[in-house]
Image: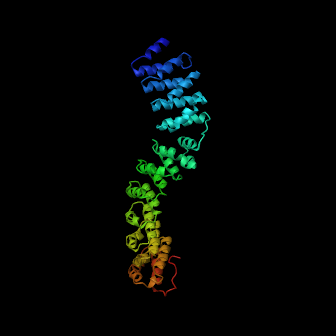
Amino acid sequence: MAWWNTLRLKSSNPEVRRKAIETLDAADSRTHDLLAASLRDEDAQVRCAVVKGLAQSKEDKSVDALVVALHDPSSEVREAAAVGLAHAGDARAHRQLANLLKDSHSGVRTAAASALRNLGWKPSTSEEQAVFDVVLGHAHAAAFAGQAAVKALVTELTHDTGFKRRAAAEALEDVDDPRATEPLLTALEDPDATVRVSAIHALGKSTSGQVTAKLLALFHDADARVKLAAAEVLAKQIDPALAPDFLGLLGDTNFEVRLTAVKFLGRIRDPELAEPLLPLLADPDSDVRQAVAQALGMIGAPAAIEALVLALTDEERAVRQAAELALGRIDSKWTYSEAAQHARAQLEASLNDQRGWVRSAATQVLAKLQAPVGESQVVGQ
């Protein structure tokens, strides 16, 4: 049978050669030389079968052959060699396996890290520890190494698995190093929306024009989570130049995006922003309506008084209270203002509303508009 397998190993058909390798008895000491010779086979699948056979061999020389296979041009062979060395349990391969932690192929890196862990290997430097942690799936732990972890985390941003890329981007948020900026900007175009979100937050500390421009472009992203993340990060800058972009978010279908835009515009305190905010006092989400009332109060625009007076009949108490406080900030004598009096007709019409709480609120507001200054109470108390 041995002569037959030897003949098959010389076949021009790689499939025949591979099957011949698989039928060899790895426990037979005479098999090793056949396997070692086939490590030079031109076909990667044959070489992969050889490596798997060597991993089953009990010959010491097989470990040396597997170490050679760690440098194979095929990532599949390198990965199989790393797995085989872990099975062999021989610590002689530590350094060669450690070199594979930086392999260009994620499967090879993972196999090498698993082998090293099984062999009891310990990193000797902070960078080595960071690389080891990242490959084993502990990106956040790697971030504790600071700048020593940047290269490993940046490499992980190109991993073929989405959650690995996301974890790397999340970890980079805790590492302050300019080397991560460009890779994170590239990650903003990742097909996985969660990766884009994590990359946005990782770039959150940067105020460079390039980063700002990229984040503003994401205001048009198809995923609401991405738009929200970009808005939340840029909102921290409180830059009036960004107001036009945030105004464009007021009509977004996602209430959290609208809410973030409203809060940002309120902090800008530009009187010209009051008019586009007014329609959102009728927003379907009460948190947005409350934020609009608060924003109008911070802006201090008298043009908002009439709409805020009408908001005193809002179904949510928090909105009514926000409107009351906003009116006080705009004009302490708002009850006597012409704008407030303009709201009387609509308030009087609300006295016929079928909803009892609307009639009650309208009655209280009308009473305030007639009460002397200093006698009014917060509506809805």
Q: Residue at x 44, y 27 (%)?
A: 44
Q: Position of residue 228 (x, y in %)?
A: 44, 58
Q: Position of residue 117 (x, y in %)?
A: 59, 36
For residue 344, which quarter of the picture? bottom left
For residue 73, which quarter of the picture? top left
Relative depth, front residue between 351 and 224: 224
For residue 42, which quarter of the picture? top left
Please, which residue is most extreme toward the bottom here?
372
Q: Residue at x 48, y 79 (%)?
A: 328
Q: Position of residue 365 (x, y in %)?
A: 46, 80
Q: Residue at x 60, y 34 (%)?
A: 118
Please, which colouring scheme is shown? rainbow
Q: Is residue 373 visible?
A: yes
Relative depth, front residue between 142 and 48: 142
Q: Is residue 314 visible?
A: no
Q: Position of residue 145 (x, y in %)?
A: 57, 48
**On screen, residue 283 above or below 64:** below
Relative depth, front residue between 253 and 60: 60
Tell how many labels: 0
Relative depth, front residue between 15 and 80: 80
**On screen, residue 321 above or below 93:** below
